[in-house]
Image (cartoon, rainbow, N blue to C red):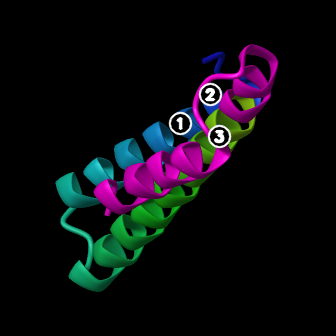
């Protein structure tokens, strides 16, 4: 699978969020602020997983149609399993 710039930028933003959280911890910021940022980062990771899985599903469906491989139902099941495992 090819990861486009949008996906990579999402991960870079998450990396920046994590560095910010670490800095907040080093500065002994309030627990609520740190938890809020951790929750925001977790949400960003979940959204990124969704984008990657959906992009991969589209790519696999197109490839399978061309090559007559797995059924679309099998591929959708695999994609759902990936999402479930990520939780």
Between 50 and 23, the one lying in front of the other is 50
Secondary structure of the residue carrying numbered label 3: helix
Residue 64 position in % (x across, y down): 70, 25
Q: CA distance from mark 1 to mark 3?
A: 20 Å
Image depth: mark 2 or mark 3 in front = 3
Image depth: mark 1 or mark 3 in front = 3
- Residue found 66% across the figure and 16% down from its top: 2
Q: Which residue is mark 1?
A: 11
Between 61 and 7, the one lying in front of the other is 61
Residue 65 position in % (x across, y down): 78, 27
Left-right relation of 71 to 37: right
- Residue found 73% across the figure and 14% down from its top: 67
Is residue 69 positioned above or below 76 on the image? Answer: above
Q: Which residue is mark 2?
A: 8
Secondary structure of the residue carrying numbered label 1: helix
Magenta-span inclusion, residue 84:
yes
Q: CA distance from mark 2 to mark 3?
A: 18 Å
**Which circle marks residue 28 in the picture?**
none
Q: Which residue is mark 3?
A: 57
Q: Are marks 1 and 2 in contact (CB under 8 Å)?
A: yes
- Near mark 1 (Cα within 10 A), the count class, few <14, some 14-19 or many ≥20, is some
Magenta highlight: main SS: helix
Can you say which quadrant of the picture contains the N terminus? top right
Lower position in the chain sequence, tag 2 or tag 3: 2
Picture quadrant of residue 63: top right
Lower position in the chain sequence, tag 1 or tag 3: 1
């Amino acid at each position: 699978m090819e990861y486009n710039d949008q996906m990579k930028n999402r991960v870079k933003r998450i990396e920046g969020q994590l560095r910010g959280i670490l800095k907040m911890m080093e500065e002994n910021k309030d627990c609520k602020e740190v938890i809020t940022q951790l929750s925001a980062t977790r949400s960003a990771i979940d959204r990124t997983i969704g984008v990657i899985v959906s992009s991969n599903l589209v790519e696999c469906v197109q490839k399978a149609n061309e090559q007559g491989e797995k059924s679309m139902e099998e591929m959708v099941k695999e994609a759902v399993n990936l999402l479930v495992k990520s939780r």
